[in-house]
Amino acid sequence: MQNGDSGGDDAPRSGTSITSTTPPLADDSAGGEVGGGPTEKCGVVGVSLTDRAAARPLYYSLYALQHRGQDSAGIVTHDGFQQHSHVEMGLVGDAFDGADLDGLNGSAGIGHVRYPTAGGVNDCCAQPFSVSFKSGALGLAHNGNLINADEIRDELESLGHAFTSNGDTEVIAHDLARNLLEADLVRAVKRTMGRIHGSYSLTVMHDDTVLGVRDPLGNRPLCIGELDDGYVLASESAAIDTLDGELVRDVEPGELVVLDADGSGFDSYQLYDEEHSAHCFFEHVYFARPDSVIDDTLVYEARRDLGRALWDESGIDTDVVMPVPDSGRAFASGYADAASEAGADVEFAEGLMKNRYVGRTFIMPTQDERERAVRLKLNPIKSTVEGKTVTLIDDSIVRGTTSTQLVELLYDAGAEAVHVRIGAPPIIAPCYMGINMATREELIAGDQSVDDIRDTIGADSLSYLSIDAVADALSERRDDLCLGCVTGEYPYDIDGEETDREVTPPTRDSEAVADD
């Protein structure tokens, strides 16, 4: 287990001496869910309370965000005198015991669950990431991915900064620490935001002050909640619900939120204000918990609306409509309701049962093993399927492995026909904003038409939801969504890729401009 304390009195006094205090932990290489589905990178949380310890509320919040990352978990707290940290590989329940939590003193803190999207063993660090420097102690938890991390790391190394990992979170921490040596908190954050480029939602601790930052395009979610004795920042509102809190609102794109150290309130600073956002539409399609509210929309209702739109665009009258558990359930519910309202004689049924005791399949590195994992994890209910025509509803198709296996399972169980409907557009390009999806070569829609994919997975028919239908269902303009994985055009300046808007990447001078 990894524990550490760092504080102001022992911090280095040299202007460029910024010391990383988070020990590097070995990560397993990432490989995805059953069939190589997309996986979210991280979940972040921060709390500031009046007079009780923050460790257990942070621990419970990380449990609520466990779906966003299962490889490591960590908490950093501050007791007003020094910082306390504990980071460990594994699930939240395995990473902490009672003694660990008791040692995390202080009424303010941040937490993180992580699923790494790049690198293998020893390449990344668990979070929150901690550094000590002349102006105190800093902890940082990050959800997202920077585009220009290598460029900034090279600059900081030339100034004498020593890095312990190749992760972008340490780059943000070092850049912010450097700016805190020369500016107040708000101005330092603005300078760092003006230099880094990419997707980020951050919870940060500067000594005993907790703050939240969302990138100017709002790509990753972050919200504010109120508790009886304090305030909380979290990737999803489900974490706030776990603490019996009330959702206040989403953190706006480009906004800095600073929680009062005594838990009495928070201050807001709109540091950047872009004309259009770039909310990740896949948060609503797949990643977020259905009971979370993200950007003013309940995820469960969004998925039901997507399912209704799927019927409107490509509905087919079959005997049974069934979801691929778990994320396909709300889509199928909305689809079946719309079908019934349209006069179709259709039954909504759970035709696939999930074995919840099968672990994540990144421990199965070969394609053959991933295909076997589908049969280990999902089993058809023969009486629901046999002799019937079936519409199978899923949220997405990535490599096509799962869909192929499931169609085969349903035919083996006696289905007369299997029609597949997908609650998102075809994924034709990778994600660079912090989601482990697949390479272009691995994406089944990267070089195949819908008809070709239908033939590959063995379905009688296949239809996807259109991009316009997604935007309508989410009550968003297309210009305010990140659609890079379904269009191949991105809201950030990514080397070798097209952009969906005019993008001016930051330079070394951007931090100075941020002071204006």
Image (cartoon, rainbow, N blue to C red):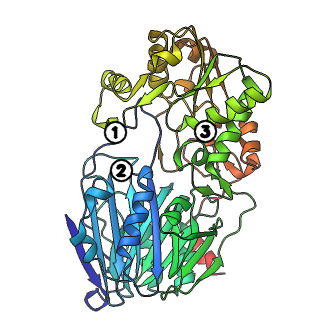
Q: Mark 1 = which residue?
A: 360
Q: Which secondary structure lies at badge 3?
A: helix
Q: Is the residue 476 above or below the residue 451 in the image?
A: below
The answer to the question of whether label 2 and label 1 lie on touching residues, with beta carbons closer than 8 A, is yes
Q: Amino acid at mark 3?
A: Ala
Q: Amino acid at mark 2?
A: Gln
Q: Which image quarter is the N terminus in?
A: bottom left
Ranked by sequence position, the earlier of labels 3 and 1 is 3
User: In the image, which is nearer the foreground, mark 3 or mark 2?
Assistant: 3
Tell whether 159 sits left or right of 291: left
Q: Is the residue 478 above or below the residue 43 in the image?
A: above
Q: Residues within 10 Å of mark 3 (few under 14, many from 20)?
A: many
Where does the image place residue 427, in percent across and percent down from the top left? 58, 32
Q: Which residue is at the far front?
A: 383
Q: Mark 3 = which residue?
A: 330
Q: In this orientation, which residue lies closer to the viewer: 370 or 320?
A: 320
**Quadrant hosting residue 33:** top left
Q: Which image quarter is the C terminus in?
A: bottom right
Q: Which secondary structure lies at badge 1?
A: loop
Q: Which mark is residue 51?
A: none
Tell whether 501 sits left or right of 87: right
User: Is residue 91 among the parts visible in the rendering?
Assistant: yes
Q: In this orientation, which residue lies closer to the viewer: 472 or 8?
A: 472
Q: Residue at x 71, y 36 (%)?
A: 467
Q: Residue at x 67, y 46 (%)?
A: 301
**Quadrant hosting residue 509:** bottom right
Tell whether 307 sits left or right of 325: right
Q: Which mark is residue 70?
A: 2
Q: In this orientation, which residue lies closer to the viewer: 220 or 491?
A: 220
Q: Which secondary structure lies at badge 2?
A: loop
Give the distance between the C-alpha atoms of the residues marked 3 and 1, in whole angstroms.
Answer: 22 Å
**Quadrant hosting residue 217:** bottom right
